[in-house]
C-alpha cells in the first residue's frame, strides 16, 4: 500500500499501536524505509543483510521512522469527519455539536455513534427548518413524525390559538405500537437534539398520537357494507288485536271500566 494513503483493507483504526495488524504494517513500512536508507550509503557499504552494526543501526532508525509515519497517517485520517477514529469521536466531532458535555443516551457502537454524529452535523447545517427538526426527531424515533407550526394554524383560523402562540410548533408522533419502552430516555434525547436545531425563540410540544386499527369485513376485502336492519314492535298493537272492546283497565277519561276506543290518532305512538 502506498504511503500516506488510506488502506481500504485496514481493520483496526484505534490509537493503540499494538496488535498483529499494526505489527504487520510496521514491518512492511520499516522495510521500505530500510531499503531506501541502504541505497543512500556509499558503495563501500556492500552488506545486503542485517548483520553488520551499521545495518542494525539503520534498521532501528527505519523502525522509528515507520512508527512516526504510521502515526501521522492516523492523524491525517482524523481531519475528515467520515474517517475519524472511534477514540476521537467526541473530542473532534461531539464537542462541536453538543453543549456542556451533554450527550444523548444511546446504545450505539463506535461506528453507529459516528454515523449518528455525522447525521447530526448534516441536519444542523441544513438550518432551523421543519425538515431538520423532523429528521432530528427521527434519529431516535422510527414512527411517523409530523411537525405542525402554530402560525400556520392561526393563519387558517384555528380556534384556541392567538398571536401569542405564533412562535410555537407541535411534534406529533404516530404511536401505532404504543409508547416506546424507554419513553423517558427517548424524550430526553429528542429535547437534547432540538436544543441545538430549533430556533432559539420557539417553544414546542411533543405528543404521541394513538390511532385505532380498524379492519372491517376482512373477508370482503376490507370494504364497509352499507346495509342495515331494523325491527319495530309496540305493545299497543297487541292490546288492540286481542281485546276489541278497548284498552283493558286503562281509560283516559279516568273510569276504571272497559271503554270502546274509536277514532283515536295513534300515529305518534311509534
Image: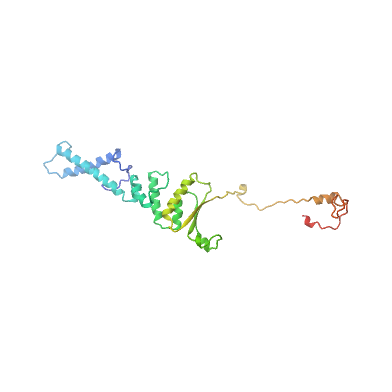
Along the viewing direction, whichever of 151 and 76 lies nearer the viewer: 151
**Quadrant (top left, top right, bottom left, bottom right) of the N terminus:** top left
Whether residue 140 is visible to the viewer of this picture, yes or no, is: no
Q: Quadrant of residue 52?
A: top left
Image position, residue 10 (x, y; %): 32, 43
Determine whether 56 is above or below 268 in the image. above
Q: Using residue 209 as the reference point, say whether residue 97 is left or right of it.
A: left
Which colour assignment does the render follow? Answer: rainbow
User: What residue is shown at x 38% (from left), y 45% (from top)?
Assistant: 111
Determine whether 58 is above or below 225 in the image. above
Image position, residue 252 (x, y; %): 84, 54
Image position, residue 53 (x, y; %): 15, 37
User: What residue is shown at x 43% (from left), y 51% (from top)?
Assistant: 192
Along the viewing direction, whichever of 43 and 111 lies nearer the viewer: 111
Along the viewing direction, whichever of 138 and 3 lies nearer the viewer: 138
User: What residue is shown at x 40% (from left), y 52% (from top)?
Assistant: 120
In the displayed image of the protein, which residue is found farthest to the left? 44
Image position, residue 151 (x, y; %): 50, 61
Amino acid at each position: 500500500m502506498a504511503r500516506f494513503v488510506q488502506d481500504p483493507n485496514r481493520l483496526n483504526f484505534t490509537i493503540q499501536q499494538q496488535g498483529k495488524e499494526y505489527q504487520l504494517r510496521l514491518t512492511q513500512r520499516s522495510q521500505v524505509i530500510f531499503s531506501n536508507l541502504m541505497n543512500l550509503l556509499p558503495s563501500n557499504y556492500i552488506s545486503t543483510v542485517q548483520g553488520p552494526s551499521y545495518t542494525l543501526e539503520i534498521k532501528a532508525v527505519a523502525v522509528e521512522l515507520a512508527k512516526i509515519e504510521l502515526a501521522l497517517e492516523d492523524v491525517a485520517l482524523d481531519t475528515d469527519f467520515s474517517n475519524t477514529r472511534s477514540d476521537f469521536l467526541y473530542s473532534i466531532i461531539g464537542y462541536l455539536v453538543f453543549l456542556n458535555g451533554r450527550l444523548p443516551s444511546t446504545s450505539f457502537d463506535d461506528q453507529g455513534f459516528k454515523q449518528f454524529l455525522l447525521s447530526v452535523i448534516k441536519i444542523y447545517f441544513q438550518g432551523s427548518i421543519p425538515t431538520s427538526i423532523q429528521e432530528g426527531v427521527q434519529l431516535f424515533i422510527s414512527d411517523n413524525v409530523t411537525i405542525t407550526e402554530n402560525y400556520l394554524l392561526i393563519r387558517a383560523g384555528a380556534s384556541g390559538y392567538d398571536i401569542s402562540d405564533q412562535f410555537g410548533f407541535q411534534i406529533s408522533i404516530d404511536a401505532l405500537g404504543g409508547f416506546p419502552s424507554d419513553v423517558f430516555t427517548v424524550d430526553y434525547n429528542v429535547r437534547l437534539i432540538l436544543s441545538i436545531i430549533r430556533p432559539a425563540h420557539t417553544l414546542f410540544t411533543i405528543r404521541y398520537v394513538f390511532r385505532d386499527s380498524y379492519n372491517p369485513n376482512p373477508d370482503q376485502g376490507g370494504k364497509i357494507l352499507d346495509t342495515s336492519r331494523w325491527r319495530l314492535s309496540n305493545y299497543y298493537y297487541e292490546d288492540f288485536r286481542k281485546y276489541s272492546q278497548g284498552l283493558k283497565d286503562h281509560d283516559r277519561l279516568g273510569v276504571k271500566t272497559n271503554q270502546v276506543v274509536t277514532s283515536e290518532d295513534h300515529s305518534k305512538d311509534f
